[in-house]
Image: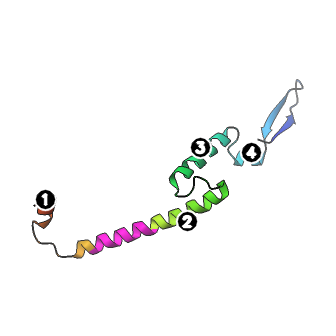
Amino acid sequence: MEMRRLAVSGGGRRRRIRTAAARRSGGGGGGVALRRKVRELRRLVPGGEGAPARSLLVRTADYIVRLKARVELLRALSALYDELPHPAGAAAAAVAGV
């Protein structure tokens, strides 16, 4: 984390202030949380185990797009299935294994 010293009047004491870049990154200790999140992404995204961090982010974005497409497909299939005529009691018989 990049720090700058700022002279404060009175007593000759100095205090540290964070630069704008450090404030944007969340300050100290943010590296641990970031590494934890990257490790979790590597676990969740297919093919992410060996990918460098930059490539992992691209893979994650692609994976999200594929998951969204899969959800849309499943919703469309569900809506189509709901429109099909179902004989009364057929669902109960199918669940009961009859």
At x 35%, y 69%, the residue is: 75
Taking the magenta stretch, the answer to whether it contains residue 18 is: no
The kind of residue tagged 3 is Arg
Identify the residue under disc 4: 22
Q: Which mark is residue 62?
A: 2
Closer mark to the observer between disc 4 and disc 1: 1
**Mark 3 vs 1, N-terminal side:** 3
Q: Is residue 9 left or right of residue 39?
A: right
> Marks 1 and 3: in contact by CB < 8 Å?
no
- In the rendered view, would you say 14 is above or below 1? above
Q: Residues within 10 Å of mark 1 (few under 14, many from 20)?
A: few
Query: Is residue 37 placed above or below 60 in the rendered structure?
Result: above
Query: Which of the marked residues, 2 or 1, is nearer the chain's N terminus?
Result: 2
The percent coordinates of residue 93 (x first, y second) are: 11, 62
Q: Tell me the quadrant of the picture where the C terminus can be found.
A: bottom left
* Label 4 residue SS: helix
Quadrant including the N terminus: top right
- Callout 4 amino acid: Ala
Q: Residue furthest top?
A: 11
Q: Which residue is mark 3?
A: 36
Amino acid under disc 1 = Gly
Label 3 – label 1 distance at C-alpha: 46 Å
Q: Nearer the viewer, residue 64 or 14?
A: 64
Pair 2/4: label in front = 2
The residue at 12%/67% (across/down) is 90
Q: Where is mark 1, residue-wise? A: 97
Q: Position of residue 89 (x, y in %)?
A: 9, 65
Residue 15 falls in which quadrant of the image? top right
- For the record, the magenta segment spans 69-80
| Label 2 to label 3: alpha-carbon separation | 21 Å
Crowding at mark 4 (Cα within 10 Å: few <14, some 14-19, many 20+): some
Q: Sequence-wise, which precedes: disc 4 or disc 3? A: 4
